[in-house]
Image (tube, rainbow, N blue to C red):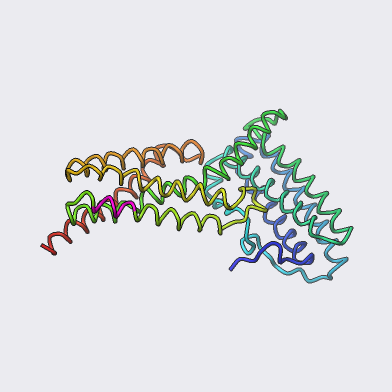
């Protein structure tokens, strides 16, 4: 079970900050190494960011030793609730400079919020001052990351604000909504079409779809709301994310449930299958538009998963009907 950030002591906050600065520095080093052959100017920026993260770590270690001694406990970010789950490093490196820039921007935003929250909870003046100084330094890193191009850096404040708002919109609305839409559109296929092909009764399939969609919406809404309080990640209020995720989950299932209000079984099933196709197409486009996933790769992944679930439901209903008959 992950611990709450509010449960950390000043000693643990400093220890965690040391670990985080070391991890972030190593990531920037990997970015620089990967970009250096093709984008040397961008690599220089990440080299500098790595050096500054190392300086931050040394300042934190020195302050820690002054207050708590030589032993520094290992406290990782994934042990604390509220941090964003990062993409695997190898995947970010594979996607190229744009993905690295976006990853760096999110990292700096998250680290800055961590230092701001940590400073507000500390009572020691020297610790508070260092945490505030580091928060300001991370803000400068975030500015650089937000404008890191393939060959040069620009500092357009208006563009920076637009990019930051876009990233927050993705974190607070698009991500929970997409998770819900995918779960509702895909996971409900099997029970709905299993009931449809078992009973050949559109009304029974409609009731099954209504129940699974509403139930899945409530379940996913609570799961999203309880997964992260948003205090450190900037992902917004958990209630809002839970509502977005829950509504999109229910909508994903209801989309191919409504056609079963058509009393004719073959017509209802055909229309529902067409709706499923457009649902999966829409999910693929959203992943391409907001999650930086190549369109064909997104389309292929979503459709393979949806098709397997759809066919499993049809098979269970069909063979179940035969066995029952």
Say which residue appears at 55% left-offset and 51% top-offset: 87
The C terminus, quarter of image = bottom left
Say which residue appears at 75% left-offset and 62% top-offset: 13
Task: Estimate the x, y position of residue 66 in percent, counting from the top left.
Answer: 88, 66
Residue 186 in the image: above or below residue 287: below
Say which residue appears at 81% left-offset and 61% top-offset: 61
Please state if 69 lies on the left or on the right of 200 as rendered.
Answer: right
Q: Residue furthest left?
A: 325
Task: Estimate the x, y position of residue 41 in percent, counting from the top left.
Answer: 68, 34
Figure disc tally:
0
Task: Estimate the x, y position of residue 302 in percent, counting from the top left.
Answer: 37, 45
- In the rendered image, residue 206 lying in the magenta stretch gets the answer yes
Residue 59 in the image: above or below residue 261: below
Residue 17 in the image: above or below residue 245: below
- Give the residues in magenta: 204-210
Say which residue appears at 31% left-offset and 42% top-offset: 276
Please state if 125 lies on the left or on the right of 141 as rendered.
Answer: right
**Quadrant hosting residue 11:** bottom right
- In the rendered image, residue 267 lying in the magenta stretch gets the answer no
Please state if 285 lies on the left or on the right of 160 as rendered.
Answer: left
Which is more toward the observer, 47 or 304? 304
Which is more toward the observer, 86 or 276? 276
Task: Estimate the x, y position of residue 140 in percent, counting from the top left.
Answer: 76, 40
Which is more toward the observer, 84 or 196? 196
The N terminus, quarter of image = bottom right
Which is more toward the observer, 257 or 128? 257
- Magenta: main secondary structure equals helix
């Amino acid at each position: 079970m992950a611990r709450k950030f509010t449960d950390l002591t000043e000693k643990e906050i400093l220890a965690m900050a040391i670990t985080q600065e070391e991890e972030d520095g190593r990531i920037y080093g990997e970015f620089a190494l990967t970009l250096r052959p093709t984008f040397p100017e961008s690599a220089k920026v990440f080299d500098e960011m790595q050096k500054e993260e190392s300086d931050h770590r040394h300042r934190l270690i020195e302050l820690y030793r002054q207050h708590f001694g030589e032993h520094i406990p290992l406290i990782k970010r994934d042990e604390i609730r509220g941090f964003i789950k990062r993409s695997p490093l190898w995947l970010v490196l594979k996607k190229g400079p744009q993905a690295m820039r976006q990853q760096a921007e999110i990292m700096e935003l998250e680290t800055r919020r961590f230092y701001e929250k940590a400073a507000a909870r500390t009572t020691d003046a020297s610790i508070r001052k260092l945490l505030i100084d580091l928060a300001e330094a991370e803000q400068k890193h975030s500015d650089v990351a937000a404008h890191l191009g393939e060959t040069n850096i620009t500092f357009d404040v208006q563009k920076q604000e637009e990019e930051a708002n876009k990233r927050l919109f993705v974190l607070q609305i698009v991500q929970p909504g997409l998770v819900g839409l995918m779960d509702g559109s895909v996971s409900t296929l099997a029970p709905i079409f299993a009931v449809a092909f078992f009973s050949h009764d559109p009304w029974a399939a409609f009731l099954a779809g209504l129940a699974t969609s509403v139930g899945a919406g409530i379940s996913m809404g609570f799961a999203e709301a309880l997964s992260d309080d948003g205090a450190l990640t900037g992902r917004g209020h958990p209630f809002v994310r839970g509502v977005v995720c829950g509504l999109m989950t229910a909508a994903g299932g209801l989309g191919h449930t409504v056609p079963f209000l058509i009393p004719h079984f073959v017509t209802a099933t055909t229309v529902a299958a067409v709706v499923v196709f457009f649902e999966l197409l829409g999910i693929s486009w959203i992943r391409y538009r907001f999650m930086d996933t190549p369109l064909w790769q997104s389309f292929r992944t979503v459709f393979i998963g949806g098709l397997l679930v759809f066919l499993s439901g049809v098979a269970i209903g069909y063979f179940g009907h035969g066995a029952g008959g």
